[in-house]
Image: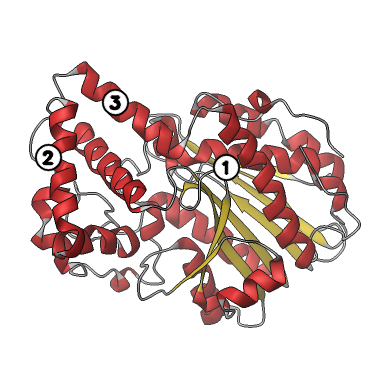
Amino acid sequence: MVSSIDIHNYFKNNYEESRETFRGLLSKVQEVWPEAKLHQHSIGENEDNTIDVIYAEATSSNDKVAMLTSGEHGIEGYAGAAVLHLFVDRYLESIDPSTTGVCFVHAINPWGMRHFRRVTENNVDLNRNYFLEETDIPYDLNENYEKESHIFLPKKPLDLISKEKTELYEALSKGMMNEGYKGIKQAKGMGQFQFERGVYFGGYEEEPSGSYIKTWQKHLLERFNHVIHMDWHTALGPTNEVTMVITENHGKKEDELKSTYGMENIQVYSPDDVKGDSTNYFYELRDSEYPSTSLFSALFEFGTFGTSREAELREFTTIILENQLYWEGTEHPESREWVREELMNMFYPQEEEWKEAVLKEACLAIEALLKEEGILQSSASRQTF
């Protein structure tokens, strides 16, 4: 039984504070894996942005490895970093270091985390940027998005927020059953690969961040018999609950996964509907080059707005207006402030109730998955708050 927890110890205010805290976890990891190392990889040239990795191989035989990643979508990395910190504090003693390694990744998209954006410095949604070959990037994929690009592409500075919201709500609401709404819903899953200033842009080429993470994915598949990967995100799913999102390439249907892991919220997606996802790429890489390696890779999302149609409209409105503000600016301070607050509400809510739910739900997901996969010893005491 764990007593009440100081959430402020886990949720940080800015990227550099979060990174410093993560780097400080190395000494704790070294108490279990003395050979653990911190790897720092610079991204970009204008700022001190790094992807930080704490990595340790098993001390005797590389049977299994737990890979926990955060910050693929920048601003979402604050909750992810909190989970990595929690994992190091609470679960290392339940892992057998002789047969199990660990790989913790802080801020896959450090620029986005620093600037509180989902995308990279190139406006790329990093989780639509992972392909086995760059020739696989589907440049002309989303016809509906192209037809309704006047909604999705920034053309002018942000006006008064009340006016912008009304116009956008009307455009999206009217488009609920037409090509425009289908276009952005499709773009959310499939990405779009034509408009570099548009929302859900998957990129014209591989992002440096993705290239670096691919080297780790390949390394783990080479070095271990069994790889278990938990990629932490925010926004999707029921409010204050965790949702597992996994490609059908894993091989199990939704009801089978729920039965195996005992989780309530699980979504299985088709690679036909979601392009460039990093976890699906993991499976494609395994199937292509390491077919004998066992792999489990999934996203774990902490819900914010919820799952209603109204929540979906709110999400699209936030994403579109934030993108417009970034590219075109505004003369209205209240518009800038509304977008900033709404973006935080969507990806990094400041309410203590949500932060407590993140830690509680993270424990449920970690224990459900990692006990079943043999990472945590089954005798590990359940963490409660």
Give the image location of residue 26, x and y in percent.
73, 37
Inter-mark Cα distance, 1 to 3: 24 Å
Give the image location of residue 79, x and y in percent.
56, 38
Q: Which residue is mark 2?
A: 167
State whether residue 257 is above or below residue 121: below
In the rendered image, the quadrant that contains the C terminus is: top right
State whether residue 177 is above or below residue 12: below
Mark 1: few/some/many CA within 10 Å (<14, 14-19, 20+): many
Q: Please, what is the three-letter code of the amino acid marked with disc 2?
A: Glu
> Is 13 on the left-hand or right-hand side of 181?
right
Inter-mark Cα distance, 1 to 2: 34 Å
Tell me the number on the disc at residue 338: 3
Of helix, strand and loop, which one carries label 1? helix
Along the line of sight, the residue nearer the viewer: 117 or 213: 117
State whether residue 53 is above or below residue 212: above
Q: Earlier in the sequence, mark 1 or mark 3?
A: 1
State whether residue 32 is above or below residue 246: above
Of circles 3 and 2, which is in front? 2
Q: Which residue is mark 1?
A: 80
> Is 245 on the left-hand or right-hand side of 154?
right
